[in-house]
Amino acid sequence: MTFRAFFATFLLLMSVAAGASESIQWTSKHDDDTHVHLYFFWSASCPHCQKALPFIRSLSKDYAWLEVHSAEISQSRANQMRFLEIATALRQEPRSVPAFFVCGRMITGYDSPQGVGQEIIRLALDCRQSPGAASPATAPGKAFMLPFVGTIDPHGHSLLLFTVIIAGMDSFNPCAFFVLLFLLSLMVHARSRSRMLLIGITFVSISALVYFMFMAAWLNLFMMIGAMPTITLVAGLIAVTIGLLNTKDYFQFGQGPSLSIPASAKPSLFRRMRGLVRANRTTTILVGTAGLAIAANSYELLCTAGFPMVFTRLLTLSELSSAQHYAYLVLYNLVYVLPLMVIVLIFALTLGAYKLSEQQGRLLKLVSGLMMLGLGVVLLVAPDALLSKLWSGALLLLASVVIAAGVHWLSSKRAN
């Protein structure tokens, strides 16, 4: 926190203690008509604020009942204090601008009139129809804080939910399943649960670390480039291409271009796996497993490289600190490796042997391809919808699964 922010906070606390704080008015009556008050705090040096200004100016013209209170904070101590006062009253942290307060709710950051803009209008309309909901007393419980991650609002932007959904999509990685299942099947012959757990957990943990580093590279690239619309367009085109290739593999498996593990690379991976079965020393097992995980992931990244790219691109378009960016990457990778860790535990408990069949691998490719194709199209057409709409990611996942199930059913019926 800068000295200026600290000093402003100190003055605010002193004024509140003296009872001099001004009341926050969310709605008011004018000739039997309810007017809604929108408080907009911005800075002249903030590019996102400048992007939001035209939208804010249009609100008063389009909605006569909406009263906009615009306050620039970099050149006014009074506006700084007012910003801190309203945020504190709502138990929110005044971390960044642009910041919007409407109906006892706080929204930070701005992307477009179709994204954050629509969310502001929706809140204002709800507030006008139900003025009683504007009381700050009703706000607690709608939004909550997570350490490092920030504020999660179930009725607005829910980056937390989006992270869980897209990481869940990514976790159905046919290449990762193939390598892990083959490795654990070989371990069954050793008839040692402790050995299988050691190798399985090490393999999954190293895989998560490699994936995290891969995503961090995407994140830093996008942060360096900035919020250029052209980059989002390119990311969308790449995602669509990856989706089409994976979908193609369901119908023409092993034919033409593919993002699967190359056939030429499989003998080397198999040799590494058989070496782990014969190894006796713990150090040799750990080093060998780590080497296998790194080698395998260098190929597995091709299978679903689009998911990390899409996620990190959208992550950099959100108003978050660097620590929050990496916190979301950690969450993403925890969700990503969860199915792999479950597979390890099941194999260790049952000592069963199971291999991913070609038909199952093709089906996973189809689901993955459809999900990636859908993400790419949304990224091209309306990238804001993925973060501004709570269930957009969940609906995309559901639609992909339903379409894949329908296609697989028709294909099976024709084959019979």
Image (spheres, rainbow, N blue to C red):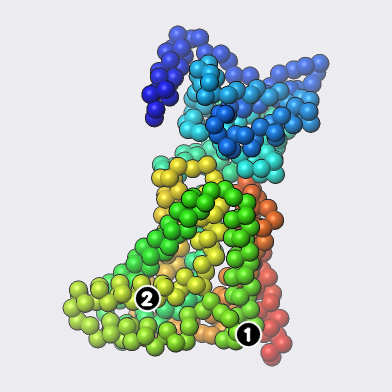
Does residue 75 show up? yes
| 67 is higher (above) or lower (below) than 373 | above
As drawn, the label of residue 295 is 2
Foreground tag (1 vs 2)? 2
Does residue 128 show up? no
Q: Under tag 2, what secondary structure?
A: helix
Q: Which residue appears at 71% of the width and 18% of the height?
A: 28
As drawn, the label of residue 252 is 1
Disc with the residue nearer the chain's start (1 vs 2): 1
Query: Residue 49 appears at what percent x and percent y?
Result: 60, 34
Q: Which residue appears at 43% of the width and 62% of the height?
A: 214
The residue most toward the left is 281
Q: Which residue appears at 46% of the width and 12% of the height?
A: 15
| 270 is higher (above) or lower (below) than 320 | below
How many numbered discs, if any? 2
Query: Residue 133 appears at what percent x and percent y?
Result: 65, 29
State the residue in front, 172 or 402.
Answer: 172
Q: CA distance from mark 1 to mark 2?
A: 26 Å
Q: Which residue appears at 56% of the width and 41% of the height?
A: 153
